[in-house]
Amino acid sequence: MLYISFFLLYIFSKASFTLDRGFYDYVKLIPRGDRVKNKIKELRELNDMTQQELADNAEVSRQTIISLESGKYNPSILLAFKIARIFGKSIEEVFIFEEE
């Protein structure tokens, strides 16, 4: 049952993720043309939170947070929900989708 849930999450989010806490936790490459900007760094600093603290709360590596803040990767839907909830915001308040 757990595997089916993760498979469905993968299908709906179109993101690749692993169950370990490595660099590629819950992230995917940014597709050409589409960009997702985020306010992670701004919200993290407003809450006096380090990258490591955010990573621990979101159950990902610090490198994942660094990659998200720099815009190198987009979060999966699961990670986007986790980060938004950590800050008490909606996904749309944290992540801004831009199409070309």
Image: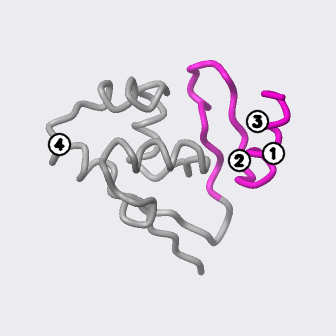
Upstream in the sequence, badge 2 or badge 3?
3
**In the image, farthest residue toward the bottom:** 100
Disc 3 to disc 4, C-alpha distance: 31 Å
Disc 2 to disc 4, C-alpha distance: 28 Å
As shown in the figure, which amino acid type bears the numbered disc 2? Ala
Could you say which is closer to the camera, residue 24 or residue 55? 55
Q: Residues within 10 Å of mark 2 (few under 14, many from 20)?
A: some
34 to 61, vertically: above or below: below
Upstream in the sequence, badge 2 or badge 1?
1
Disc 1 to disc 3, C-alpha distance: 5 Å
Upstream in the sequence, badge 2 or badge 4?
2
- CB within 8 Å, label 1 to label 3: yes
Residue 55: quarter of image: top left
Upstream in the sequence, badge 3 or badge 4?
3
Pointer 4: what residue? 47
Kindly identify which numbered label has been placed on residue 6. 3
Q: Measuring 52% from the left and 75% from the top, which residue is drawn there?
A: 98
Residue 3, x across and y down, in percent: 82, 29
As shown in the figure, which amino acid type bears the numbered disc 4? Asn
Span colored in magenta: 1-30
Please tell me whether mark 2 or mark 3 is closer to you in this view: 3
Q: Measuring 62% from the left and 56% from the top, which residue is drawn there?
A: 30
Residue 9, x across and y down, in percent: 74, 45
As shown in the figure, which amino acid type bears the numbered disc 3? Phe
Pointer 2: what residue? 15
Asked whether, in this view, residue 86 is left or right of residue 19, the answer is left
